[in-house]
Image (cartoon, grey):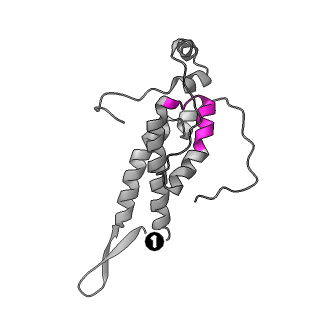
């Protein structure tokens, strides 16, 4: 949550509220400036994992009316953080989450959390509000009535 401690929850985008059937959102949507949606390509400087996130979510978010040209900076941030988290998890995949603390005789006397877990936790703390802003968490989509997407026969592999 951004802002001070009493600023409250961030509002859902009007497009998501309208999809939920909120009559006030439908009326508000008619008076709001039209959302400009242009076909955008991911920035050239994106890492492959960030490009994968972009390609995975861009078309569905624009189709839902949640992503417009004015939202691109936030979406770029979402792709960067999500891509960095994917890279981080790949780098430390298979390593233990906890490390034994040994005394002078080499005996394990305690365990401590691996330092890469703290980094991952911070990335998730930055990523979660961004996902919520775009309706990419399960709780943000409760009650949405979009046509179901047929599952793909191929499994997508993260680059």
Identify the residue at horizontal 52%, vertical 22% (top origin): 14
Disc 1 crowd, CA 10 A, few/some/many (<14, 14-19, 20+): few
Q: Could you tell me if residue 31 is visible in this image?
A: yes
In the image as oriented, which residue stretches furthest toward the front? 44
Task: Inspect the magenta stretch and tell me whether residue 60 lies in it.
Answer: yes
Residue 139 placement (x, y as % from top left): 54, 36
In the image as oriented, which residue stretches furthest toward the bottom? 105
Mark 1 lies on a secondary structure that is loop
Identify the residue at horizontal 43%, vertical 39% (top origin): 129
| Magenta stretch in the rendered image | 57-69
Residue 152 placement (x, y as % from top left): 74, 50
Residue 21 placement (x, y as % from top left): 61, 20
In the image as oriented, which residue stretches furthest toward the left? 104
> The C terminus appears in which quarter of the rendering?
bottom right
Q: Is residue 21 above or below residue 152?
A: above
Is residue 93 rendered to the left or right of residue 114?
Answer: right
* Residue toward you, 11 or 29: 29
The image quadrant that residue 95 belongs to is bottom left
* Residue toward you, 108 or 55: 55
Q: Could you tell me if residue 20 is visible in this image?
A: no
Task: Inspect the magenta stretch and tell me whether residue 61 lies in it.
Answer: yes
* Residue toward you, 129 or 138: 129
Q: Which residue is mark 1?
A: 95
* Residue toward you, 23 or 99: 23
């Amino acid at each position: 949550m951004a802002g001070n401690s009493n600023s409250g929850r961030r509002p859902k985008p009007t497009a998501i509220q309208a999809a939920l059937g909120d009559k006030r959102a439908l009326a508000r949507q008619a008076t709001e400036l039209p959302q400009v949606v242009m076909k955008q390509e991911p920035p050239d400087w994106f890492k492959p994992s960030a490009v994968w996130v972009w390609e995975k979510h861009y078309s569905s978010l624009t189709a839902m009316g949640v992503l417009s040209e004015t939202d691109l900076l936030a979406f770029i941030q979402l792709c960067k953080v999500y891509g960095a988290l994917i890279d981080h998890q790949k780098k430390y995949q298979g390593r233990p989450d906890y490390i034994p603390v040994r005394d002078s005789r080499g005996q394990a006397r305690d365990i401590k959390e691996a330092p890469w877990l703290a980094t991952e936790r911070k990335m998730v703390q930055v990523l979660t509000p961004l996902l919520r802003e775009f309706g990419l968490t399960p709780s943000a989509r409760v009650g949405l009535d979009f046509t179901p997407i047929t599952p793909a026969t191929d499994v997508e592999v993260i680059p």
